[in-house]
Image (cartoon, grey):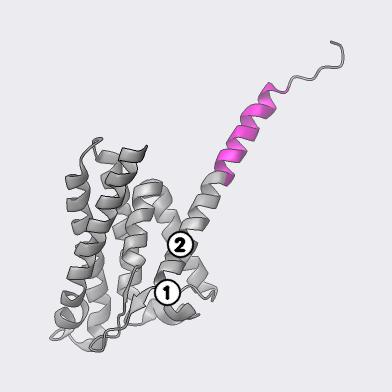
Amino acid sequence: MANSVDLSHVDESTNSLIKNWSVAFQVLAASFFLALCAQIKIALPFTPIPLTMQTLAVMIIGVTLGKRNGVWAILAYFAEIAVGMPVLSNFEMNPLVFFGPKAGYIFGFLAQVYLMGWAVEKMKKHQIQFLALMGFVACITQLAIGVLGLAPFVGWKNVIMMGFYPFIGGEILKIFLLCISLKTLRKSI
């Protein structure tokens, strides 16, 4: 055919563009999922830090997107906070949260998502126990970073009782939910 055009190079670039947009959409959707999970919370009367479903969301993001794109999703969430979007618990718009008692817990999401993404990349096909162990390590790491951020506001004497112990049981339950969900999903696939 005299009028045909070679589009093979366009197909490659189009596929690359579609893949990049798909990843960008996944990252943005994950950041909004994290914001949605911030709304599921239980206020604890003895600490300024509420119990939310955000750490479960962070673990899910790490498991589904991997460490690299999981970190990008958390950074997108940070950007949403920084520009004043209502993505914090109670749909709060407060860029200054990065300087308050909750800052360490929020920054701890980066370590948590990275560890979960790393774990799922290293995990063999049926190693749910490894994922559960890494989930515990990731949660303890996130809480430890949170405690470091909370300590200047409540004092070193009170910080473990106010910012660490109250959350351990909830984190273990979230890890259990994550592992049960993954096991169920794997059976159905």
Return the mark for residue 33: 2
Question: Which one is in front, 189 or 16?
Answer: 189
Q: Is residue 54 left or right of residue 83?
A: left
Q: Amino acid at mark 2?
A: Phe
Residue 83: % across, % down: 55, 73
Question: Which one is in front, 189 or 174?
Answer: 189
Depicted 144 relative to depicted 93: above or below: above
Q: Secondary structure at mark 1?
A: loop
Return the mark for residue 11: none
- Per the image, is 166 magenta? no
Q: Residue furthest front?
A: 188
Residue visible at 19% across and 63% down in the picture: 172
Q: CA distance from mark 2 to mark 1?
A: 10 Å
Residue visible at 30% across and 51% down in the picture: 181
Depicted 38 relative to depicted 6: above or below: below
Depicted 17 relative to depicted 28: above or below: above
> What secondary structure prevails in the magenta region?
helix
Residue 106: % across, % down: 35, 70
- Per the image, is 8 magenta? yes
- Contact? badges 2 and 1 (CB < 8 Å): no
Answer few, some or many: residues within 10 Å of disc 1's Cα (few below 14, many 20 plus, some between 14 and 19).
some
Q: Amino acid at mark 1?
A: Gln
Q: Residue 160, located in which quarter of the rendered image?
A: bottom left
Q: Is residue 181 left or right of residue 21?
A: left
Return the mark for residue 39: 1
Residue visible at 51% across and 46% down in the picture: 23
Residue 171: % across, % down: 23, 65
Kindly tell me whether residue 187 is visible in this rendering: yes
Answer few, some or many: residues within 10 Å of disc 2's Cα (few below 14, many 20 plus, some between 14 and 19).
some
Q: Which residues are magenta?
A: 7-21
